Amino acid sequence: MDLTWIIIGIVALVVIIFFYYYNRFSVLSNRIDGSLSQIDVQLKRRADLIPNLVESVKGYVKHEKSVITEVTNARKALMGAKGIEGKVKADGILESALGRLFAIAEAYPDLKANTTFIELQKELSTTEDRVAYARQHYNDSILEYNTLCTTLLGKFFAGIYGRVKKEYLKIAESEKKNVKVEF
C-alpha cells in the first residue's frame, strides 16, 4: 500500500512540474506580447502628437517646408510599418526628422515662446521617456523568457512545448554613434 502512495505522489509531482513549466512559458510569452503592444501604443501616441506639432510650426517656418515634409513622411512611414524591425527603423527616421525640426525651431524665438509648441515639445519628451521604458520592459521580459529557455529543466520543457529563445529589441547602428557636440 505504501509503494502505491509513493508512486501516486511521484506521478502527481511530475504532472505538477509539467503544468508549472507550461504555465510559466505562457505567462512570459504573454508578458512579451504585452510589452510589445505597449511599445506600439507609445509610438502611436507620439505619431498622433506630430500633426499638431507640425501645424504649430508651419506658420513660423514657411520657407522650411522640406523639414516639415520630412517629418510628415516619417510619421506616415511609422504608422504604416509592419513588424517590430520595421517599426524600430521607421521610429529612428522619425526621431531624426524631429531632431532637425527642433533644431530649426531654435532659430525662431517667437516659435520657441509659443505655448502650444512648448506643450507639444513637453508631450513628445514625455512620450520619448515612455517609449524608452516600454522598450526596456520588452527586453527585460525577453531576458526572463530566454533565461527560462536556457536553464536545466527549462530547456527540457522548452523543447517539449516547442518554445525557442526570442530576439531582443535591437538598436540600429546609426543610433549607436557618438553624438558630436561642438561649441
Image (spheres, rainbow, N blue to C red):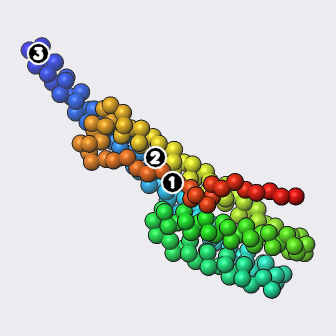
Reading the image, the residue beneath label 1 is 169
23 or 128, nearer to the observer: 128
- Secondary structure at badge 1 equals loop
- Mark 3, residues whose alpha carbon is within 10 Å: few (<14), some, or many (≥20)? few
| Residue type at numbered disc 3 | Leu
Of badges 1 and 3, the one in the foreground is 1
The three-letter amino acid code for the residue at tag 1 is: Leu
Q: Secondary structure at mark 3?
A: helix
Q: CA distance from mark 2 to mark 1?
A: 9 Å
Q: Percent from the top left, x then y, of residue 38? A: 53, 57
**Residue 127: x percent and y percent?**
67, 60
Q: Is residue 113 visible?
A: yes
Residue 111 is left or right of residue 163, and the answer is right
N-terminal-most mark, 1 or 3? 3
Mark on residue 142? Answer: 2
> CA gap, disc 2 to disc 3?
43 Å
Residue located beneath label 3 in the image: 3
Quick check: 67 left or right of 1?
right
What residue do we see at 56% from left, 59% from top? 172
